[in-house]
């Protein structure tokens, strides 16, 4: 963690605070903004390693504050079994991947995620296929999250395609994300990506995230939704495409 010194720490804190602000304002994925922002100052694998504690804290809060978590657990418990498997495999790849390949994967994940958030799907999963598609989505989310810390796209696509109630949706997303993030933290330590000092930095990284999120929640009513979402879309697309460019050139 020698890289985190002086101005580098300040730049990382700004990226994390901005990500928290965006999450508070628009409710979009924290890693989508934080990782490309931090990657401007630090190694991409290190940026991914700084995110898990913030993800754990925000998703625990999301679960605790949701009254429908029991219904979500009864319906989606099989997904809780496969997401951790995918996360561990993904972290192993993260630990061994070529930096250019990793940059391309993260960049592509950010671009696709941004587009999916902007242009919501109208797909429907038949009831008889829900369990099978859900298992595939849980495994895919774990794999993607283990490599990039971005778990949500496969989960959001699946949950949106089965048309569940909004509150059940929120509880399910928090529960499923936590099921992937928790083993991700263990795997990051096991594969040498996150040591004791790194875990300390990851815990400290949660402070600017939470501060930004609180500010974003208070400012939410002052900013029109459509212009803000367009601004975020442009920001994410630019960040993702820049990571892909770094992988190619």
Image (cartoon, grey):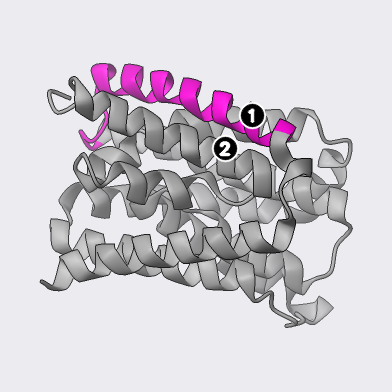
Q: Quadrant of the N terminus?
A: top left
Chief secondary structure of the magenta portion: helix
Q: Nearer the viewer, residue 116 or 183?
A: 116
Q: Quadrant of the C terminus?
A: bottom left
Whether residue 12 is visible here, answered yes or no, is yes
Q: Quadrant of residue 120?
A: bottom right
Q: Give neighbour class at mark 1: few <14, some 14-19, many 20+ (Cα, 10 Å).
A: some
Residue interval drawn in magenta: 191-218
Question: Which residue is drawn at the image coordinates 31% and 41% (left, top)?
Answer: 38
**In the image, residue 18 lies at what x, y percent?**
48, 38
Q: How many marks?
A: 2
Classify mark 1: helix, strand or loop: helix
Decide: is 238 above or below 180: below
Disc 1 versus disc 2: distance between alpha carbons?
A: 6 Å
**In the image, residue 236 lies at what x, y percent?**
45, 61
Q: Quadrant of residue 124?
A: bottom right
Q: Quadrant of residue 217?
A: top right
Question: Which residue is drawn at the image coordinates 71% and 68% (left, top)?
Answer: 131
Residue 219 among magenta residues: no
Q: Is residue 68 left or right of residue 118?
A: right
What residue sits right under mark 2 in the picture?
A: 21
**In the image, residue 141 lies at what x, y percent?**
51, 59
What residue sits right under mark 1 in the picture?
A: 215
Q: Nearer the viewer, residue 154 or 236?
A: 236
Q: Nearer the viewer, residue 239 or 72?
A: 239
């Amino acid at each position: 963690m020698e890289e985190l010194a002086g101005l580098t720490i300040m730049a990382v804190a700004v990226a994390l605070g901005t990500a928290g602000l965006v999450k508070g304002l628009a409710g979009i994925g924290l890693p989508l903004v934080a990782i490309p922002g931090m990657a401007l100052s630090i190694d991409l694998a290190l940026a991914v390693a700084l995110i898990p504690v913030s993800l754990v804290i925000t998703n625990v809060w999301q679960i605790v504050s949701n009254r429908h978590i029991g219904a979500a657990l009864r319906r989606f418990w099989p997904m809780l079994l496969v997401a951790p498997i995918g996360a561990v495999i993904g972290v192993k790849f993260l630990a061994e991947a070529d930096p250019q390949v990793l940059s391309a994967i993260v960049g592509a994940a950010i671009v696709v995620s941004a587009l999916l958030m902007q242009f919501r799907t109208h797909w429907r999963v038949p009831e008889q296929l829900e369990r099978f598609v859900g298992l595939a989505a849980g495994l895919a989310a774990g794999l993607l999250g283990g490599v990039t810390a971005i778990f949500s796209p496969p989960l959001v696509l699946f949950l949106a395609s089965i048309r569940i109630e909004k509150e059940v949706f929120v509880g399910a997303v928090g529960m499923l994300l936590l099921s992937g993030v928790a083993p991700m933290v263990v795997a990051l330590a096991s594969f040498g990506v996150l040591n004791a000092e790194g875990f300390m930095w990851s815990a400290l990284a949660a402070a600017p995230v939470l501060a930004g999120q609180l500010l974003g929640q208070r400012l939410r009513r002052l900013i029109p939704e459509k212009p803000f979402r367009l601004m975020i879309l442009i920001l994410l697309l630019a960040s993702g495409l820049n990571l892909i460019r770094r992988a190619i050139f």
